[in-house]
Each structure stands twice: as C-alpha cells, then as structure tokens.
Amino acid sequence: MNSTPLSLAPEQRARRAALLNYFSLFSSFSTLICCALPSVLVLLGMGTAVASLLSAAPWLVSLSRHKIWTFSVAGILIAASFVMTYVVAPRLQRGEVCAADDPTTCGEVSKLSRVVLWSSALIWSGGFFVAYLLAPMLEYMDK
C-alpha cells in the first residue's frame, strides 16, 4: 500500500493530521519552557525560581543551548500543520464520509485540531518574542 496522503483511508488521514497538530503543540511548549519562561522569570526578578527550575529539570539547559534548532523544528512542525489543516485537509475532505450515526464528528475533530494548532502557534510566537526580540527591544529602549 502506498503511504501518500491521498491513498490513506479518511480516518488515517485525520489521525495523521491530528498527530501533526499535537507534535506542533508539544514542540511549541518546549520552546516556551526552554527559552521564554526563564527569560520572563529573570525579567520579573525571579532568578531564584529559574535556578530551582534548572536544578529540578537540568535537561532544559540542553534545550536552551540548542534553541535555534528547537525553535526551527517547532516552527516547521507548526507550518506543516497549518498547511495540512488549511490546504491539504479541505481538498481531501471533499470525499470523506463521516460516521453515519454522528455526521458532526468530522467538524468537531477539525475544530479541536484547529484550536490545538492556533494554541501552539500562539505559544511559539510568545516564546519567539521573548527569546529573540525582547532583549534587543529593551536594549534599544535603554539607550
């Protein structure tokens, strides 16, 4: 069986799209935790909270050392999820048959996937702002 999106059954395509949305949500949370949250806590004068967070979860140091990769992978996953949700899925859903006993199932799943997708995009945007744009803006305003 060919594994291209067109040859998959509708439930497999929906599962693949939902999985992509949840991966993008997970990766956007990782950008928030590794890079944005410590910066905001330090900005608010809570450096000891950052120190205790890093002692409880030392793997965050590795994530923050590779924040370019972390943000890049998360951004690619979110972009791919947007393409899948708003470009590919509507083309594939034209022939999709929902459950006969509940015809709103396809709409509900799609709505939940969109909420997860937009949530992950907002989280990623907030993390990107704090990790890359906030410090230069504060330096510029300080001059």
Image (cartoon, grey):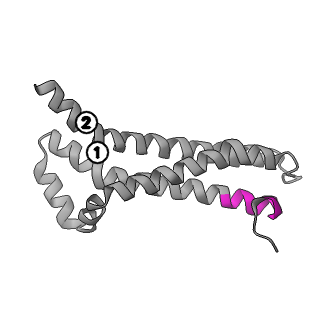
Q: CA distance from mark 2 to mark 1?
A: 7 Å
The amino acid beneath tag 1 is Ala
Q: Describe residue 79's horizontal placement relative to residue 86 as left or right.
A: left
Q: Describe residue 106's horizontal placement relative to residue 140 as left or right.
A: right
Asked whether residue 7 is drawn in magenta, I would say: yes
**Residue occupying image coordinates x 35% and y 50%:** 32
Q: Is residue 70 visible?
A: yes
Asked whether residue 113 is drawn in magenta, I would say: no
- Seen in the picture, residue 63 relative to 87 is either above or below; the reply is below
Check the picture and name the quadrant holding the C terminus.
top left
Range drawn in magenta: 6-16
Nearer to the camera, 74 or 120: 74
Q: Is residue 112 visible?
A: no
Mark 1 crowdedness (10 Å alpha carbons): few <14, some 14-19, many ≥20? many
Q: Position of residue 79 (x, y in %)?
A: 55, 47
**Residue occupying image coordinates x 69% and y 46%:** 110
Q: Quarter-wise, where is residue 12 in the image? A: bottom right
Mark 2 touches mark 1? (CB < 8 Å): yes
Instruction: Look at the numbered disc 2 and give the secondary structure of its residue.
Output: helix
- Seen in the picture, residue 143 relative to 114 is either above or below; the reply is above
Q: Which residue is mark 2?
A: 134
Q: Describe residue 129's horizontal placement relative to residue 99 as left or right.
A: left
The amino acid beneath tag 2 is Leu
Q: Which residue is mark 1?
A: 131
Q: Position of residue 73 (x, y in %)?
A: 45, 57
